[in-house]
Amino acid sequence: MLTIRSITAEQTYPLRHSVLWPDKPFDYVKIENDAEGYHFGAFLNDELVAVISLFVNGKDSRFRKFAARPDCQRRGIGTLLLNHVITEAKRLGATTLWCDARLDAADFYRRFSMEAVSEIFYKGPIAYAKFLRPL
């Protein structure tokens, strides 16, 4: 059974690290303003398998550090988690949602009506663009 629930920033760190930046030091995945965010986890049979963090600043919202365990990708779990974040951002009064998306995940974000609104940029060797959608 899959459930989505609020978690602490600290609970996101192991998946953030192992999925997104395994070659970096563990502290690399911590965000300076993690304490100000809303953090959500997808639990499959009570095991944390995906995480995402939402930051709301007035009408603007951003999600960061979206990570799913590799064996749980392409199973709809990330879709459910991102839909949950969209609902939460709206509930919190945001009118836009954006992220810095890895280009290899661009098609996934386009399915949520997100569009690239920046030039391509790099974090290390990984290509990104800012993706945005109105809420």
Image: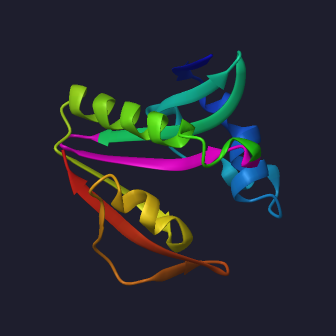
In percent of width and height, residue 111 lies at 35, 56
Q: Is residue 135 visible?
A: yes
Question: Residue at point 43% right, 83% down?
Answer: 120
Q: In the rendered view of the protein, which quadrant contains the C terminus? A: top left
Name the residue at the front extreme.
Answer: 75
Relative to 90, does residue 43 appear above or below in the rendering? above
Give the main secondary structure, helix, strand or loop, of the magenta stretch: strand
In percent of width and height, residue 19 lies at 73, 52
How many numbered marks appear? Answer: 0
Q: Taking 39 as reference, is 46 left or right?
A: right
Question: Residue at point 59% right, 37% down?
Answer: 51
Q: Which segment did they paint magenta? A: 57-70
Q: In the rendered view of the protein, which quadrant contains the N terminus? A: top right
Q: Taking 28 as reference, is 51 left or right?
A: left
Residue 82 sits in which quadrant? top left
Relative to 118, does residue 15 appear above or below in the rendering? above
